Image (cartoon, rainbow, N blue to C red):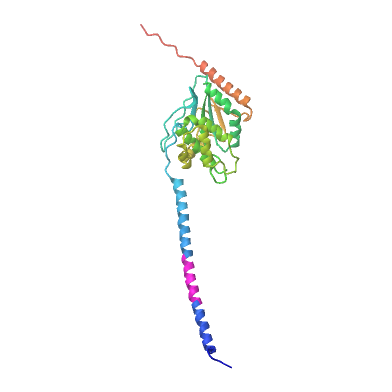
Amino acid sequence: MSTGGSEPRPTRNQRREAAREKARVLREEQKKRDRRNRFLIQGGVVLAIVAVAALIGGLIFNSIRPAGPGPRNMASDGILLVGGENGIEAVETTAIPAGGRPTPTVPDDSGTVANIVVYLDYLCPFCGQFETTNSETMRTMVEQGAATLEIHPIAILTNKSAGTQYSLRAANAAACVAEESPEAFFDFNSLMFENQPEELTAGLTNDEIKDLAAEAGAASSVDSCIDDTTFKSWVQDATERALTEPIPNSDLESVTGTPTVLVNGKQYVGSLEDPAEFQAFVLQATGESYSESEATPTPTPTPDAG
């Protein structure tokens, strides 16, 4: 038998040493992997902490950021709409300064005009019923000069929209339109209710709200105002004032729910779905104001002495 070229079989000690060396190499490779994994985990934790800290910091900043000025044309916390040559026009006013107070609107006390004031929340289903029922009636009355309409957007249902703060965002959007395109406000207000989402849903997105503003004829400059929630602080302040302070030109101590509708200072508490009932209330309130204005004697000039 030829044995040329065959290598001797490793001894038991050689096999043992080879196994030990292989195990040592494997241990070293495992240590390297462990060190690499620890580094990656630690780095990930640091990045996560930084991200959470940035998020918390942003939330804190947004919650404590200084109050800015309110929107132009809403010095009373509401926008006053009147009839004009081009249909419904907004009475232009300066903005409430940062930290300032609203200036109540002086109503027309002639007794021939219905001063309609509405406090509303764009997520409120009852507001939607009132607007759907009476929007066109109010449009006609304002265009004909028979009424003025003052709309106060507030946000009392901010926590009823699956975390998106729809009420606040919608009221802010209304403020943006009042500031940038007041002539489009009535139509924007109507479109917001025509497309009103249900409570406990996410509501309209900012892009959808911007589309409605454009459909109403608002300038594109409202877009950044809506995205930035520019008037967030004002919405919160105006809502707090409405819920805790007397309502100007009325006997109401505060708004207790929406819609709160006043005509010449008298609160409408009738049907939200019967246009005839609201029209009758407007006529009655206006007639009472007229009677009161007629009952007030006009001072007689005193003749000059000698």
Q: Which residues are magenta?
A: 26-39
Spot occupied by residue 295 in the image (x, y as percentages of width and height):
52, 16
Q: Is residue 35 magenta?
A: yes
Question: Looking at the image, which residue is at 51% across and 82% down?
Answer: 20
On the image, the x and y values in percent for residue 292 come to 53, 18
Where does the image place residue 131, in percent across and percent down from the top left? 58, 31
Placement of the N terminus among the 4 image quadrants: bottom right
Residue at x 40% of width, y 8% of height: 303
Q: Look at the image and tell me whether residue 303 can be seen.
A: yes
Q: What residue is drawn where x is 50% and y is 81%?
A: 21
Report the magenta stretch's main SS.
helix
Q: Is residue 239 visible?
A: no
Residue 68 placed where, x, y %? 42, 39
Please tell me whether residue 289 belongs to the stretch shown in magenta. Answer: no
Is 102 in front, or is 9?
A: 9
Is residue 256 shown above or below 45?
A: above
